[in-house]
Amino acid sequence: MGYQRICEVLDGKVRGHPVAIRRFEEQPPAGFDGLKVDPCQILRHAMDDGRRVYFDREHQDCIHGAFITGVHPGNEQIRSGHLLTDYIPAYNLDAAHTFNSGEYILPQGTVKGFCAAPLPDLPENFEPEWIVLVCTPATAALAGAARAVKDGTRPDTAAGNSFCSDLFVTPIYTDNVVVTTGDMGGRMNNKLKESEMFVIIPVRWLPGLLDIFGKDPDVKGIYEATRPEDSAYWERQREKAARAAIPMAGQAYAHSLELTISMPWDKEALDAIAGAPRFVRAMAIGNVEDYADDNDYDTVTLAVVEAQAESIGMGKFMRRAVGKKAFWRRWLGKQ
């Protein structure tokens, strides 16, 4: 598996490093540090700090997480589910007992522990079982299809589980992609922002990421293929085609940037669009020109581009980052 290639296509799309996870059934692998933290927190230390870390029965600071992952027998309050009903009023006892005795946990002795390492810095002969990404919902919507694009199986989604279940248990039972918000503890332990979530991908489905992020989709093509004959889109396209037959301001400069415009643009506005990823430039031009049409602008200026960005909630960021890839990643997330 070409893990470095996976890291390359995910660069700039995920927080920190993608993290490789695997279980161990005897001794932890050499070169990994045992941490006395909540089990799910080993993710953050690998993701943000670039460390190779693990937890086991001795190296953990949450008996509930250790119980769920099968490395600690817990206690009667945990095993019975009373831990949840005693402190979280929403749970009834039957639900809490089911949670702590069913498919969400590993039987005791199944593993000795779990380790995590940044995917770009794997030790020699270390083979991950799955990887974890922390990313925006827009990226999760794409990465979550890593298996779906291969065999049509949609990802599992999770909410209401302990994040230790999502992170360490579900991949063993299902071998499927998991897209999850995580629970309160998992989000706090990994310092997630409100705009971030988790995607967990078994190694066998990682090639799907190369297809999703490594190949430019025909965004305009799929958009047009879904427009009905009476869509206002086609009328706008006919109007643009008519205008395109008439020489207009900015046309030569747009051509030099390999951009196609159908109304007058000034140089600053074209420069802003030229900073977008190649596959999205045509869609960006179309969106800006639609905005200009709707608001009776005769020429697309940088102010019009900024106003269109403002209309989708990206104006402030656009003004700080015109032409920068960071803006266009954020802009894509708004579509």
Image (cartoon, helix red, strand yellow):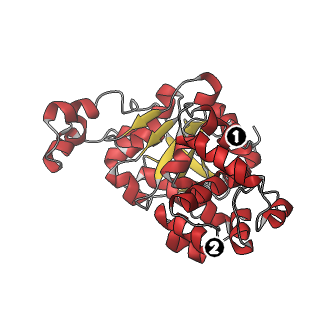
The three-letter code of the residue at mark 1 reads Asp
Figure check: 69 above or below 248:
above
Disc 1 from disc 2: Cα separation:
26 Å
Question: Which quarter of the figure is the N terminus placed in?
Answer: top right
Q: Is residue 21 visible?
A: no
Mark 2, other Cα within 10 Å: few <14 / some 14–19 / many ≥20: many
- The residue at the point 14 percent across, 34 percent down is 93
Query: Viewer-nearest of labels 1 and 2?
Result: 2
Residue 254, located in which quarter of the rendered image?
bottom right
Figure check: 308 above or below 131:
below
- The residue at the point 54 percent across, 59 percent down is 291
Figure check: 123 above or below 155:
below
The three-letter code of the residue at mark 2 reads Leu
Of the numbered discs in the image, which one, if any, rests on residue 302? 2
- The residue at the point 48 percent across, 48 percent down is 198
- The residue at the point 76 percent across, 46 percent down is 5
- In the picture, measured across the screen, residue 163 lies left or right of residue 210, that is left
Figure check: 148 above or below 126:
above
Q: Where does residue 227 sit, x and y in percent of width and height?
A: 56, 34
Where disc 2 sits, the SS reads helix
Q: Are marks 1 and 2 in contact (CB under 8 Å)?
A: no
Q: Where does residue 91 sit, x and y in percent of width and height?
A: 17, 40
Which residue is label 1 attached to? Answer: 218
Residue 208, located in which quarter of the rendered image?
top right
Q: Is residue 63 visible?
A: yes
Of the numbered discs in the image, which one, if any, rests on residue 277? none
Between 199 and 301, the one lying in front of the other is 301
